[in-house]
Image (cartoon, helix red, strand yellow):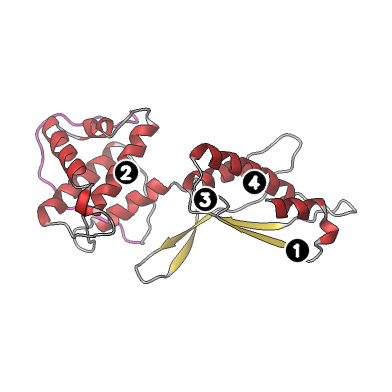
């Protein structure tokens, strides 16, 4: 940020600089400080994008910034894209890198008008992993699903995943889902010790995932070009859960 500030303050000292690339400018910051840095950096980048030369002609510095921090990314996009009084609108594009397979190749996906949310993409990845023909489920996927449920409950102002579980299915299923998510999200099932699920746990995971996506009406991105499908499940007794958005 200091270098960018010098570039804008003394443009004649850096005549050859036409592009700036900023890679992950935050590290180990809490959310409040991540938001603060994002707002400050976005303000600086807006100045760079609307920079003029000595004759008043547009002379913008083109900037690319990248980050793995979803909150930081979203705040930056909001701050840069928002129309501000007495300031020109900043032209910008938003993308995310997605690995379409396990062999190290990546694609660049545009987010268009909707900001990219990490938990939504993670849900799409879990859905692909849960495909009963082409997917492969490991027990650490329970940990990933629980993390997404915690974020969803927090979004609705609740303290834990019991809010999500109570909305999903019958009382019997809620107890079963809770036991699975509590027991299979810890200990030897950590991500650095991947253990492939047994068939019973795979079916249970698919049922929890399908109920969660359906009940909360998530709109998931197509990350592979192939629509994933959960394994069919037997009908369950009990009242149908009412979607949260209703």
Q: How far apart are the alpha carbons under marks 2 and 4?
A: 29 Å
Residue named by callout 4: 41
Side (left or right) of 40 relative to 229: right
Q: Which residues are magenta?
A: 225-246
Q: Which residue is pictured at 26% across the width and 40% down the height?
A: 212
Report if the CB atoms under discs 2 and 1 are less than 8 Å apart: no
Name the residue: 20% across, 54% down.
188
The reply, left or right, for residue 92 in relation to residue 152 is: right
Give SS at disc 3. Answer: loop
Secondary structure, mark 2, is helix
Give the total number of marks visible in the rendering: 4
Q: Which mark is residue 147?
A: 2
Whichever of callouts 2 and 1 sits on the residue coming sooner in the sequence is 1
- Foreground residue, 231 or 48? 48
The residue indicated by pointer 3 is 27
Give the distance between the C-alpha atoms of the residues marked 3 and 2, in whole angstroms.
Answer: 21 Å
Residue 17, numbered circle: 1
Q: Is residue 23 left or right of residue 140?
A: right
Q: Is residue 39 above or below residue 6?
A: above
């Amino acid at each position: 940020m200091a270098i960018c500030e010098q570039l804008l303050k003394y443009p004649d000292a850096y005549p050859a600089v036409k592009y700036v690339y900023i890679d992950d400018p935050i590290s180990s910051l809490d959310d409040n400080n991540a938001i603060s840095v994002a707002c400050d950096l976005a303000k600086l980048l807006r100045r760079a994008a609307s920079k003029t030369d000595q004759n008043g002609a547009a002379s913008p510095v083109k900037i690319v910034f990248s980050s793995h921090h979803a909150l930081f990314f979203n705040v930056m996009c909001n701050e840069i894209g928002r129309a501000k009084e007495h300031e020109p609108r900043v032209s910008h594009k938003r993308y995310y890198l997605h690995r379409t397979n396990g062999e190290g190749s990546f694609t660049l996906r545009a987010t268009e008008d909707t900001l990219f949310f990490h938990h939504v993409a993670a849900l799409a990845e879990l859905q692909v992993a849960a495909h009963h023909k082409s997917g492969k489920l490991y027990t650490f996927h329970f940990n990933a699903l629980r993390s997404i449920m915690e974020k969803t409950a927090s979004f609705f102002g609740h303290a834990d995943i019991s809010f999500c579980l109570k909305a999903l299915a019958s009382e019997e299923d809620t107890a079963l889902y809770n036991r699975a998510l509590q027991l299979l999200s810890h200990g030897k099932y950590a991500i650095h010790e991947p253990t492939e699920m047994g068939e019973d746990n795979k079916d249970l995971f698919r049922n929890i995932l399908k109920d969660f996506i359906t009940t909360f009406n998530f709109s998931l991105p197509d990350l592979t070009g192939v629509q994933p499908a959960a394994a069919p499940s037997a009908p369950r007794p009990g009242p149908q859960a009412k979607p949260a958005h209703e």
